[in-house]
Amino acid sequence: MELTFFGLTLTSAPKVRQNLFRQIHEIVFHGKGGYDWHTIYNMPIWLRKYTFKLISDFYKEETESIKKAQEGKDKKSLINSDGKVSSPNFKNTTSYK
């Protein structure tokens, strides 16, 4: 029988450790210089989880807004359904007299 320390076992401890370091990396990387590794590592767990959730939510919302902006109804493409590039029809806006 495996001894456990706060529910950790020999098989679950590496996964927990990997998740911890992934979370620290994500906060430091996506925090854009606002956090350093030692600060996040020594941060209280509840605050680290809260910070991680805020950053995660921010990037999810940003991704959704970019997708919505790209789904314009009047979006036109120079590539037709066959994969061929069609030349654009530019209006001659200049008038020479």
Image (spheres, grey):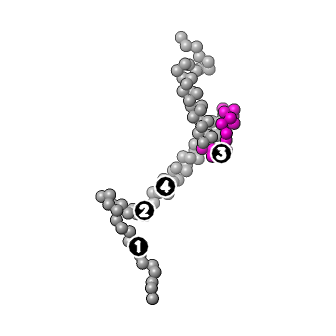
Which circle marks residue 33 in the picture?
Answer: 3
Whole-angstrom CA distance, mark 1 to mark 4, is 27 Å
Residue located beneath label 2 in the image = 75
Q: Secondary structure at mark 2?
A: loop
Whole-angstrom CA distance, mark 4 to mark 2, is 12 Å
Q: Which residues are magenta?
A: 30-45
- Mark 4 neighbour density, 10 Å: few (under 14) some (14–19) many (20 or more): few
Whole-angstrom CA distance, mark 1 to mark 2, is 16 Å
Left or right of residue 41, residue 18 in this image = left
Identify the mark nearer the N-term, 4 or 3. 3
Q: Residue furthest bottom?
A: 97
- Mark 3 neighbour density, 10 Å: few (under 14) some (14–19) many (20 or more): few
- Mark 2 neighbour density, 10 Å: few (under 14) some (14–19) many (20 or more): few
Q: Secondary structure at mark 1?
A: loop
Whether 44 is among the magenta residues is: yes
Q: Amino acid at mark 1?
A: Phe
* Quarter of the figure with residue 26: top right
- Name the spot of residue 9 as percent of width and height, x first: 56, 19
Whole-angstrom CA distance, mark 2 to mark 3, is 36 Å
Which one is in front, 74 or 29? 29
Identify the mark nearer the N-term, 1 or 2. 2
Identify the mark nearer the N-term, 3 or 1. 3
> Residue at left 48%, top 53%?
67
Residue located beneath label 4 in the image = 68
Q: Amino acid at mark 3?
A: Gly
* Quarter of the figure with residue 48: top right
Which circle marks residue 90 in the picture?
Answer: 1
